[in-house]
Image (spheres, rainbow, N blue to C red):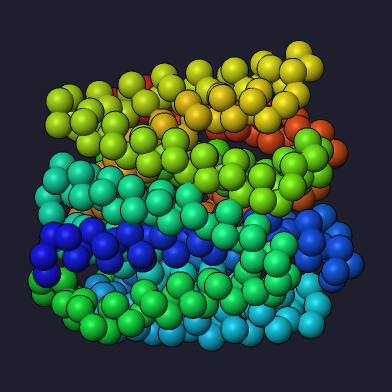
Amino acid sequence: MPNGLIVLLLSLLLGLQPVTTDLYLPALPVLRGELSASMAQTQLTLSALLLSFGASQLVWGPLSDRFGRRPVLLVGLSTYVLASLASTVAPDIGWLIVWRTVQGAAMGAAVMCARAIVRDLYQPLQGARVMSQGLSGLGVIACLSAPAGGLLTDALGWRYALLALGIFAAASLALVIWRFTETVPQKNANALRWASLWTTWRHIAAHRTFLAFSALSACSYAGLFTFLAASSFVFIGVLGLSKTLYGAVMAYNSVAYIVGTFVCRALLARWGVRRAVALAAGLTLSGGTLMAGLSLTGWVSVAAIMVPQTLFMVGHGIHQPCGQSGAVGPFPQAAGAASALNGFIMMVFAFAMGQWLGNHMDGTVLPLTLGVWFWSTLIALSAWTLVQRHG
């Protein structure tokens, strides 16, 4: 496959994740009212999706090592489309949670395969560069998702915002059917044998490089998820923005992330992974600390959140490609399993934060700002200690 096609496929497969979360965010306050759901139930439509997304990768990873990336992508994307259609007509919050959980499990196939494809085709340093290109595409998709979700929710209702997810997945499925060529160099006949699988997972989980980069990527994603899960309630409910303006704020957030992925490629070319991650951690911690400090001293506004968030998102655009490719790098023969375990760890962190937010959203900005600060601190610690020693 040409390099441009690979980057496009990565962008779509990785972009399914922000489409599934970001496009849906402006609809959360509306569907909460229409379905008479509690705050905890509403948050569960996100956090349950992410938990199933993480757990499913432990299944998809070995399956893709055994049978290849293509069949896993075909099954996963087809299931996602069906779950999207079902969630569109969900009669109550319970069924919506069920179908969002199925959606998350299907999404795991796309994102896990994308990370594994990078390791199939590239060595770790080049893989980080290609991953950053794919994540630039993800940033563009995320940039469009929240505004599109706001417009769809305002014009047609929250169900049409959910329908848009299925349309995006169907387009991605069509491209996989049409152009994707299998990338697994040699399928692993033992990948699904329990003894072999357990040995592989144990080897991956004990590898210090994997642990270092997984800690970085998991903390970075948990910080982003804190912002995503709380943002609609803070910007719309507390700060009084319309859904359209909220979509514009989220688009700006994605632009900052795109800038980070370009900065990532420049830093990698000049200084390599460890130095790039260390420099990005300085941005991340500065952003989280400033955000928390402003909110604790009573400076509550869109600017008081988004200026520090800009620093966090530029750092996130560096940490994610380095973290995801770095975690999978040591395992060329088990890229699917390593990608799956890395993804599972990331989603466990996000699920735990989602549950905490569901019980602590108190009508102020503090759960968001202090949550981002908490994860910023852990990101910096991971980048300055674990990655420097074992990356």
Residue 121 drawn at (x, y percent): 13, 60
Q: Which of these two is toward me, 186 or 255?
A: 255
Q: Which of these two is toward me, 285 or 154?
A: 154
Q: 196 above or below 371?
A: below
Q: Classify residue 273 as left or right of residue 101.
A: left
Quarter of the figure with residue 151: bottom right
Residue 24 drawn at (x, y percent): 63, 61
Residue 268 drawn at (x, y percent): 20, 32
State the residue at coordinates (31%, 67%): 113
The answer, for residue 284, to whether it is visible in the render is yes
Figure disc tally: 0
State the residue at coordinates (71%, 51%): 243
Taking the view exactly as shown, the residue that stands out farthest to the front is: 155
Q: Quarter holding the C terminus?
A: top left
Q: Quarter holding the N terminus?
A: bottom left
Q: 157 above or below 267?
A: below
Quarter of the figure with residue 85: bottom right
State the residue at coordinates (59%, 18%): 290
The answer, for residue 327, to whether it is visible in the render is no
Taking the view exactly as shown, the residue that stands out farthest to the right is: 36
Q: Which of these two is toward me, 58 or 132?
A: 132
Q: Which of these two is toward me, 302 or 377?
A: 302
Q: Classify residue 375 as left or right of residue 263.
A: right
Q: Classify residue 89 as left or right of residue 121.
A: right
Quarter of the figure with residue 289: top right
Q: Classify residue 227 as left or right of residue 213.
A: right
Q: 95 above or below 120?
A: below
State the residue at coordinates (15%, 25%): 270
